[in-house]
Amino acid sequence: MEGERVRRLAEAKSYLQKRIEELEGEVELLKLLLSLVDAALSRESFTRAAELPREAPPAPPQAPPEEAKEVDLGSRVSEHAVTSRDGKELARVVVYERGLVIKPLIDLPADSPPLRSFFVAKILEGYKRKDGEMVEAGELAEEEAFDYEVVEEGGLVKEIRVVNYRERRRLDEIRSALRWTLQRVLERMGGG
């Protein structure tokens, strides 16, 4: 009787372990599919600046902070909206030859965990660190290295300026990570 019980417990343990492995594999597959869908959404929601509807004349540009005046991003290439799953515009991304400017359309607290611990610490700082290593190794000129600036006002992010993203892949990853970040912030605010 005792041996039968031990055998059944061992079978149950084996089944649970196998099932956990299957579910973990399914979760990984679902995460991969989600990242592919995010990338496709990112490409689909991209709108060239010339195709954007002309509504009201743009507000006169405000003088940027002193440090930003030194950086020339080049000519404007395109602009697109970052939208939530339900279609709400969360931000506008203006792409230039040598950089991009992200303008949140929702209140984006500068200290929100999705922004600080993921978008800034992992994505932006990751590119900055990698380019810094390339500069130190002599593989990249310092003026071509990735950099960014988070412009805050009253505890909210007004814009994020990125300089020298250099590769289309990086631009796509920044846009995808931005969409995820803004969606999480919106959910935390109870709006998504």
Image (cartoon, helix red, strand yellow):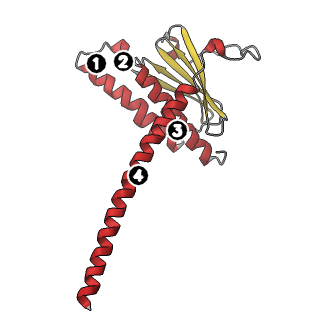
Q: What element carries label 4?
A: helix
- If the image is split into quadrants, where does the N terminus sit? bottom left
Do the numbered discs 2 and 3 sit on residues whose CB atoms are within 8 Å? no
User: What is the CA distance from the residue labelled 1 to the residue labelled 3?
Assistant: 30 Å
Q: What residue type is labelled 1?
A: Val
The mark that comes first in sequence, 1 or 3, is 1
Position of 46 with respect to 52 (left or right) is left
Q: What residue type is labelled 3?
A: Trp
Q: Mark 2 points at which residue?
A: 145
Which residue is depicted at the point 67% across and 45% down?
191
Q: Which amino acid does label 2 sit on?
A: Ala
- If the image is split into quadrants, where does the C terminus sit? top right
Q: Which class describes the residues within 10 Å of circle 2: few (<14), some (14-19), or many (20+)?
A: many
Q: Name the residue under label 3.
A: 180
Do the numbered discs 1 and 2 sit on residues whose CB atoms are within 8 Å? yes
Q: Name the residue under label 4.
A: 26
Q: Mark 1 points at which residue?
A: 135
Q: What element carries label 1?
A: helix
The mark that comes first in sequence, 2 or 4, is 4
